[in-house]
Amino acid sequence: MESKRLIFNAYYEFLYNTLLERRERISDTIKNLLPAELSHFGPYSSDNFDAYFDACLAFLDERLEMYNPFGVQYTFDNLHSAFAKKLELQLSWFDSSREFEDLEGAVDEILALGFDENKLDDYVGRLVLRFGAYPDRSIIDSFRLNPAARKLPDFLLAQSIEQVIHEEK
């Protein structure tokens, strides 16, 4: 397997395992953050809270599938990756292309120093420390630049993931 792809797969697998292992903690973090964030958009009912919370959990499931090392995204070659990126930009309210380029640049830096498969965990640790969970930085920055209630579930999930993945085990 190509070294670059191996590093990316290990990064996504780490995120998958961490989110799966800490799913309950992420859920609790969302519950704790949601009232204050939701109040920025006016008064809300328990039904509003429940709907936003459910959306956050659905997005967590979606993120887990994105990182899943046995998911469909790993079944095929990346023949349509340019098309997929364009489609993602049309479907998402945030642009994560710059964040991905930065992540890819960091992987290239690692490879330029000489790849050692025995250091794969170290490479992943450095990427997570520097970038967190892709595409959280783009989601958080975009929301802060232009907050909107419809963006809140993505934002809360990103905030919660970042908080939880950087906690000590």
Image (cartoon, rainbow, N blue to C red):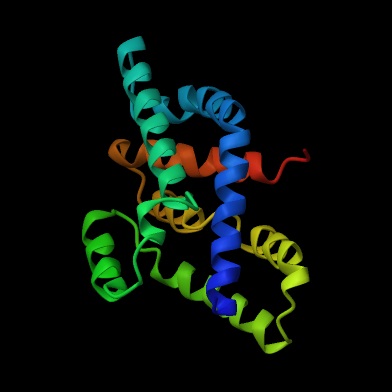
In front here: 4 or 41?
4
The quadrant of the picture occupied by the C terminus is: top right
The residue sitting at 65% across, 44% down in the picture is 165
Rendered image quadrant of residue 11? bottom right
On screen, residue 65 versus residue 168, left or right, reads left
Rendered image quadrant of residue 150? top left
In front here: 77 or 58?
77
The residue sitting at 47% across, 75% down in the picture is 101
Give the image location of residue 143, x and y in percent. 40, 49
The quadrant of the picture occupied by the N terminus is: bottom right
In front here: 115 or 36?
115
Rendered image quadrant of residue 103? bottom right
Give the image location of residue 52, x and y in percent. 35, 26
Vertical side of 20 occupied by 11: above or below: below
Number of marks in picture: 0
Give the image location of residue 100, x and y in percent. 47, 69
In front here: 157 or 151?
157
The residue sitting at 73% across, 87% down in the picture is 113
The answer to whether any part of residue 134 appears in the image is yes
Vertical side of 161 occupied by 71: above or below: below
Vertical side of 127 occupied by 49: above or below: above
On screen, residue 69 versus residue 71, left or right, reads right
